[in-house]
């Protein structure tokens, strides 16, 4: 017998303990018959005032990932969703692939994570070559995001990092700040805009921004959850989060296929 509520799919989701945005975002995107089951990667809400502080934060995240995966596996999920962003870009393309492979091996499940999801989302829109990027990170984190995209064959034309003062305070970034950041990274030389950072409340704003700037605006939470749904054959249209969840009902062919 299937799960009474998750009769289509049960998603295990891992996210940092300080993150208050990704869980409500994923629940708002959740179709009937799909359930989200969160496991928290414990990290302290220490101040972040430099690249060194940001690197220390990344070490805390890495130290807790395996335990978070192991805890959530006891609910017998069908698929693993990585509700964090920076770690999936860290080290560039090859390191991202290695992270996915380690998580697949540990969980025995298929994986949706930010780096793969954004890259797949951009392929839905055709010949995207030049992007603008908005992050909540400090320069050390921004460098890793840039490295990943450039190794994936994209040119990062403009990047704005908002330098959140702690992991929890990422969720306090305002809509006004995000609108200003979008304006900073947009331009005629940009084909699409990507927002990184799963604790940034950008999912609905991205859909609104698409209508005004007339180009794809990919919020990472939307991309991750879209990827998880489509990878599991769930093609429901979900309105209110932009064109990705409304218009693209299957994953694109792999790059180079």
Image (tube, rainbow, N blue to C red):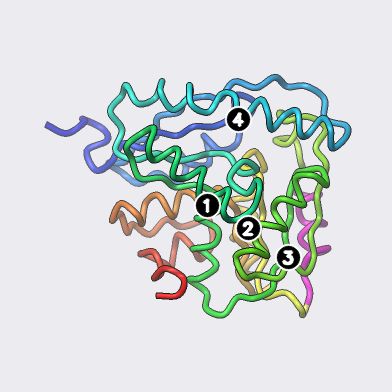
Q: Which residue is rendered at x = 58% and y = 51% of the image?
A: 220
Cβ–Cβ under 8 Å for marks 3 and 1: no
Q: Residue at label 3?
A: 132
Q: Is residue 212 left or right of residue 110?
A: right
Q: Cα distance, mark 4 to mark 3? A: 27 Å
Q: Position of residue 209 (x, y in %)?
A: 67, 63
Instruction: Say whether disc 2 or disc 4 marks the residue closer to the N-terminus.
Output: 4
Q: Nearer the viewer, residue 43 or 238?
A: 43
Question: Of marks 4 and 3, which one's residue comes earlier in the chain?
Answer: 4
Q: Which residues are magenta?
A: 175-187
Which element is circle 2 on? helix
Circle nearer the N terminus (4, 1) = 4
- Residue to which mark 4 is pinned: 62
* C-alpha distance separating marks 2 and 3: 13 Å
Q: Nearer the viewer, mark 2 or mark 4?
A: 4
What secondary structure prevails in the magenta region? helix
Q: Position of residue 117 (x, y in %)?
A: 50, 55
User: Disc 2 or 3, which lies upstream in sequence?
Assistant: 3
Residue tagged 2: 206
Residue located at (70% from left, 35% from top): 171
Name the quadrant of the N terminus. top left
Q: Can you tell which mark lies on residue 222?
A: 1
Residue at 64%, 49% (x, y): give it: 202
């Amino acid at each position: 017998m299937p799960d009474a509520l998750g009769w289509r799919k049960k998603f295990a989701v891992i996210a940092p303990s300080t993150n208050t945005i990704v869980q409500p975002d994923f629940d708002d995107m959740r179709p009937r018959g799909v359930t989200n089951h969160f496991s928290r990667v414990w990290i302290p809400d220490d101040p972040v005032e430099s690249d060194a502080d940001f690197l220390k934060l990344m070490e805390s995240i890495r130290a807790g990932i395996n335990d978070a995966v192991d805890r959530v596996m006891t609910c017998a999920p069908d698929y693993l969703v990585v509700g964090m962003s920076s770690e999936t870009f860290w080290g560039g393309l090859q390191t991202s692939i290695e992270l996915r492979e380690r998580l697949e091996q540990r969980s025995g499940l298929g994986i949706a994570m930010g780096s793969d999801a954004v890259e797949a989302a951009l392929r839905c829109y055709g010949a995207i070559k030049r992007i603008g990027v908005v992050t909540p990170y400090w320069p050390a984190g921004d460098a890793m995001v840039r490295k990943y995209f450039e190794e994936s064959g994209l040119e990062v034309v403009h990047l704005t990092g908002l330098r959140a003062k702690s992991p929890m305070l990422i969720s306090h970034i305002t809509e006004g700040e995000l609108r200003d950041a979008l304006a900073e990274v947009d331009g005629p030389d940009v084909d699409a805009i990507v927002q990184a950072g799963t604790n940034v409340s950008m999912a609905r704003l991205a859909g609104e921004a698409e209508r005004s700037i007339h180009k794809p605006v990919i919020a990472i939470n939307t991309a991750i959850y879209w990827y998880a749904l489509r990878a599991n054959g769930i093609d429901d249209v979900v309105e209110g989060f932009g064109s990705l969840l409304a218009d693209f009902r299957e994953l694109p062919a792999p790059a180079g296929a």
